[in-house]
Image: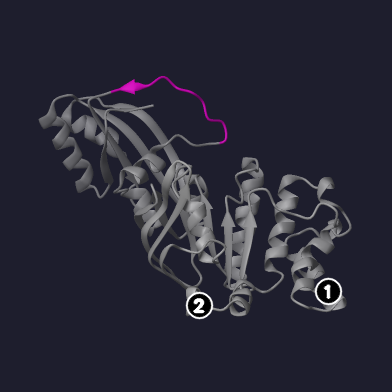
Amino acid sequence: MITLNNVSKTYNTKEGTVQALDNVSLTIESGDIFGIIGMSGAGKSTLVRCLNFLEKPTSGTVIVDGSDLSKLGDRELRAKRGQIGMIFQHFNLLMQKNVIDNICFPLKIAGVSKAEARKKAYELLEIVGLTDKAKAYPIQLSGGQKQRVAIARALATNPKLLLCDEATSALDPQTTKSILALLKEINEKYGITIVIITHEMAVVREICNRVGIIGNGKLVEHGNVIDVFSHPQSEEAKELVLRNTGENRELVETLETKNCIRIVFSENSSYEPVIANMVLKFGTPVNILKADTKNVSGIARGEMILGLPEDEKLASEMIDYLKERNLAVEEVSGHVG
């Protein structure tokens, strides 16, 4: 569906040249819900804008559904963009138009008759669950309702690809869940490929089947969400996976320990008292610094951060014990906070 080959993007500013993207190569398959995640300023929004050529790469190629976007003329590029819907963090609705007219707007630009456009718009309102808000104006809607209108508008031209640039960042956690559930339903029902740009690992875990991690303009890691969650390889991935998340984030005092590890429980290992058995076997307690269960692509995955004994040999034997029981184990540098 989407292939990026050695895509780079630079900007010339008063302060000098900024390398927003650096030699990014990536493939997104048809039907994927693909997450692109990174910290602020990593280059992820630039990347998503290159997917529809709102930003033209300085070098490299972007191929969407078999078409090299760099080789398309203006008319062909406009037609291709009609197959690519986009939703934004701040909705970008036309405030002077009501809901039904907002959804009709791209159809009007495409030359669709008013009657046909309105019929299509009402069908889309039913899909997003807002049939009772057709005559309402954006100022009368909640944030979640505005985003549902934006999704309906993005679907108006029957796109094959939907780009979501921080589409849930302005929403509360409960509304975020409902929007993600809607996007997943649209993906499954209509087969639309979805690319989600976010800085929140929780969003990726909730909905995506594959993920790419961006750091300083580079694609530092990519793969299945479960694999990246269980075995993060890059420093950026480890930071995103280990970072405290949740609806009620609390500041906690930093807990220092010399031998700190993170373990991930699969479905098969969740019912065995592995930690208790390990403590009994080695006759030495461990410090549980964090324990949590997360939904990763629809599968419950438990994780723990453990502080092991300072004796290196004993700690190593405990790690081997955990690995023998098919747990994902990785070292965490220094502390958990």
Residue at image mark 1: 119
Q: Is residue 67 above or below residue 127?
A: below
- Whether residue 206 is visible here, answered yes or no, is no
Quarter assignment of residue 224: bottom left
Asked whether residue 335 is drawn in magenta, I would say no
Residues 84 and 312: in front is 84
Residue 188 lies, in percent from the top left, at 57, 68
Q: Residue at x 50, y 62 (%)?
A: 50
Count every numbered label the image shows and give the total: 2
- Whether residue 122 is visible here, answered yes or no, is yes
Residue at image mark 2: 65
Crowd tier of the residue under label 1, counting other residues whose Cα lies within 10 Å: few below 14, some 14–19, many 20 or above: few
Quarter assignment of residue 271: top left
Residues 221 and 17: in front is 17
User: Start and end of the magenta stretch?
Assistant: 247-256
Asked whether residue 254 is drawn in magenta, I would say yes
Which residue of the protein is positioned furthest toward the front in this rendering? 14
Mark sitting on residue 284: none
Q: Residue at x 76, y 59 (%)?
A: 129
Cα distance, mark 1 to mark 2? 28 Å
Which residue of the protein is positioned furthest toward the top in this rendering? 253
Q: Secondary structure at mark 1?
A: helix
Q: Is residue 144 left or right of residue 119?
A: left
Q: Residue at x 83, y 78 (%)?
A: 116
Majority secondary structure of the magenta segment? loop
Evaluate if marks 1 and 2 touch, with contact meaning CB atoms under 8 Å apart: no
Residue 123 lies, in percent from the top left, at 78, 70
Q: Is residue 109 left or right of residue 140?
A: left
Residues 56 and 114: in front is 56
Q: Is residue 267 above or below residue 333?
A: below
Residue type marked 2: Asp
